Amino acid sequence: MTNPSTPPAATDPGLIRPRTAAEGRIAILTQYFATDAVSHGDVASFPPPSALDELPFAERRRLLDGLLTIRPPRPIGDEDMRDELDDMLAAESRERAAAAGDPDALDLPVLAATHGVPGALGERVALWEGDLTTLRAGAIVNAANERMLGCRAPGHACIDNVIHAVAGPGLRAECAEYMAGRAERDEGLEPVGRAVITGGYHLPAEHVIHTVGPVVDDGVVAPRHRTRLASCYRAILDAAQEASLDSVGLCSVSTGAFGYPKEEAAPLVLATIEAWLAEHPESETRIIICAFSTEDRAAYESALAA
């Protein structure tokens, strides 16, 4: 007699749980991009399909994300795989946004309503704590590095990595095309303090505005750091204005791995936005300051209180 506590034998085909459509798609895509990575020398080797099949769904999805993160911006040769990936990323992006309540930049309350801030700053700017990659907006901002191709470190939680992961390989391909143009003109790497606008791909936002912020060593902020950070935000707002965008979601440029202290960046960002609005009274762009964490929000709350 069979012990009821003993799990059914995995070899019994009648007792194997069938894959869901999502699981089947992840299995196919993971195997394709693993084979692609090995054949192009991105990785030396990869587990065989039988080993991948034994991984839980969440681990296989993380594995696929890692493969896409390290993948250079080369074309996806198989059209069916490209379509499968696009369908998956589009569905995941919709699910992320729905889980966050489908936030829309134009619906978020402005500082005049939430903090009693007067003038253009209060009327045109909102402070929102949330995931920038779920925000429906004319554009969201990416704190890029000078190579402009994403973070490329699997699992890294920086905004550069997260935006590229949600947007999909099309974003890296467009950034690579932009950088190739710079190389042809002997312009080198992307300088600090400018802004570059690209498509948004699978993000809810229509566009991404990329900027390279200053690197602060040991947390010591010098005048040149303040000047360059202010230049980033002015360039972002200029790009949004020139593109006639109705809204732009700002990330906290340079306050992560680049070392700019949050409590020093927040008042500078607010002052820069206020000065820009004074110079552009005709602007109707809604500006969303996105606080990704409670620490980010606390820095802006303190700056607003001051």
Image (cartoon, rainbow, N blue to C red):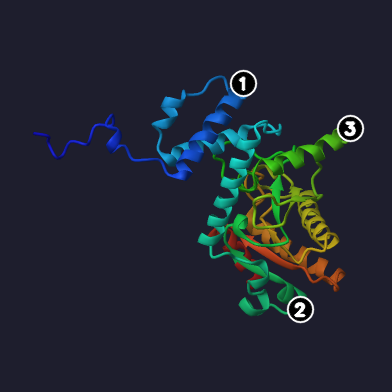
User: Going by the picture, which residue comes out furthest to the right?
Assistant: 185
Q: Amino acid at mark 1?
A: Ser
Q: Crowding at label 1, few (<14), some or many (≥20) Cα neighbours within 10 Å?
A: few
The mark nearer the N terminus, 2 or 1, is 1
| Left or right for 46, reference 256 | left
Is 119 in front, or is 218?
119
Label 1 close to label 3 by CB (< 8 Å): no
Residue drawn at 60 percent across, 26 percent down: 37
Residue 12: where, in percent of width, then height? 27, 32
Mark closest to the chain's N terminus, 1 or 3: 1
The earlier-in-sequence mark between 3 and 2 is 2
The residue that mark 3 highlights is 184
The image quarter containing residue 291 is bottom right
Residue under numbered circle 2: 119
* SS state under label 2: helix
Residue carrying label 1: 39
Residue 306 seen in this snapshot: no
